[in-house]
Amino acid sequence: MSSTMSSLTFNKKGGGERMKKIVTACGSGVATSQTVASKIDSMLEAEGYKERVEAIDIKGLDDIIDKVDIYVSIMPGGKKYDKPTINGIAFLTGMGMDEEFEKLKSYLK
Amino acid sequence: MSILSNAIKKDLILLDCDAEDSESVICQLADILHEKGYVKDTYKEGVSSREKIYPTGLLLQKYSVAIPHTDTKHVNQPAVIIARLKKPVKFQYMADPKQDVMASIVMMLAIKNPSEQVPVLSAIMDLISNEANRTRLMEAKDVDEFYHVFTDIQ
């Protein structure tokens, strides 16, 4: 998984384009966000995408939001960011997951 | 063998748990984890206060689920304790705290090492997001039958 993600080998796409940064966040950065990230990672991997989702503590999100391309929201009731956003809960419950994944892929294009 | 065979323990399954509200479920489950040494005495308060800020109810068809948990510092040893409730209790929806979720199954997580436990949580979520599996859990006659829902999957 992320251990194989060397910034040198994977940070560039074919055309030298920067790889998009996908971030998800939850209250403790412990369980929910990592589980969502792992589910999305496996779906991205299965479709040959190199991008991976980074799970962080919600408290750290403000500091890095400028560098984020796509935000996977686990707490839609929380703060809104002016970034392409998908619903992360769908990847926990399976409900609406395919739609959210399609949306994510459209943001990755 | 399923990854869950090791992670789910029969002595951490409570069928027909009787609770009036989410606080009571959290207390009952936290007490058991504490008695068995899985968590520190601060765990209960940790879960309960986190639940208020970041609720963990998951709205699902027919039988909803909640997955209360807290920071690793309150945990001695990883565990998953599962309660099937006699009657559903109200949690708030993770995706929208203003919305109520009447949870029939509560899976409380004691997380020590997130990177090691995420595969377990992912496997649990894959299982629980399937309505047929939730129905099997709700209809299981005893702990053995309940446990086998987790271990039967590939």
Image (cartoon, grey):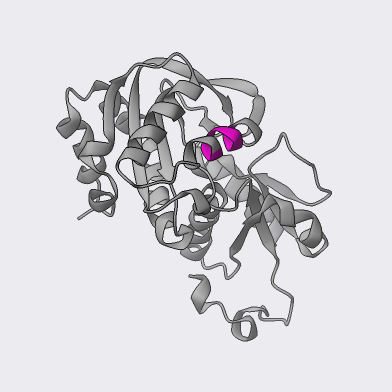
Q: Classify residue B54 as left or right of residue A98.
A: right
Q: Classify residue A7 as left or right of residue A64.
A: left
Depth order, front residue of A99/B136: B136
Depth order, front residue of B133/B97: B97
Which stretch did the figure color magenta? Answer: B46-51
Residue at 35% over, 40% down: B33
Name the spot of residue B105 as percent of width and height, x first. 38, 27
Quarter that holds the C terminus of chain A? bottom right
Q: Is residue A26 magenta?
A: no
Residue at 76% over, 51% down: A84
Residue A37, above or below B53: below
Depth order, front residue of B36/B87: B36
Q: Is residue B64 visible?
A: no
Magenta span main SS: helix
Q: Is residue B49 magenta?
A: yes
Residue A16, above or below B5: below
Please tell me how many numbered marks the rendered image carries: 0
Residue at 28% over, 37% down: B12
Extreme-front residue of the structure: B41
Q: Is residue B104 visible?
A: yes
